[in-house]
Image: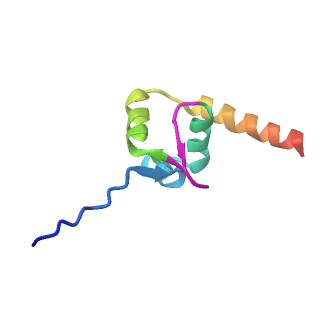
């Protein structure tokens, strides 16, 4: 009898790994999530991004410069944090 060994395909990626995949920083990925560009899934303490969602984001934003939106979101969060301190 032959048993099949199923490969464990990773269907999701962490924010840190997603940042590596798209050649940016984890804080930029977090900003894209907060802005609604990327959707996540949270089943445990770790928030993950489905690989299909990361691909969807990349295809939907080809040729789009998101740097202004990302920087504005990071600045907004920084000001918000300073105001609450």
Q: Where's residue 69, x and y in %?
A: 61, 29
In the rendered view, tell whether residue 85 sits above or below residue 64: below
Which x, y percent locates residue 54?
43, 40
> Is residue 28 positioned above or below 20 on the image?
above
Q: Quadrant of residue 71?
A: top right
Q: Quadrant of residue 50?
A: top left
Residue extending farthest to the front is 1
Q: How far across and how far down the image is residue 64, in percent?
A: 46, 26
21 vs 70, left or right, is left
| The N terminus - image quarter | bottom left
From this viewpoint, which residue is outermost toward the left? 1
Would you say the magenta stretch is mainly helix, strand or loop? Answer: loop
Instruction: Please give the name of the residue rendered at 90% of the width and 46% of the height, measured from the top-left corner.
Output: 85
Q: Is residue 47 magenta?
A: yes
Name of the residue lying farthest toward the bottom: 1
Q: Residue at x 38, y 40 (%)?
A: 52
Give the residue drawn at x 56%, y 43%: 29
Residue nearest the viewer, comparing 43 with 79: 43
The boundaries of the magenta stretch are 36-48
């Amino acid at each position: 009898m032959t048993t099949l060994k199923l490969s464990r395909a990773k269907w999701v990626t962490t924010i840190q790994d997603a940042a590596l995949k798209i050649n940016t920083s984890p804080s930029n990925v977090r900003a894209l999530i907060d802005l609604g560009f990327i959707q996540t899934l949270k089943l445990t303490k770790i928030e993950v991004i489905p690989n299909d969602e990361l691909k969807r984001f990349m295809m939907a934003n080809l040729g789009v410069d998101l740097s202004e939106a990302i920087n504005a979101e990071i600045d907004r969060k920084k000001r918000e944090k300073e105001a609450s301190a």
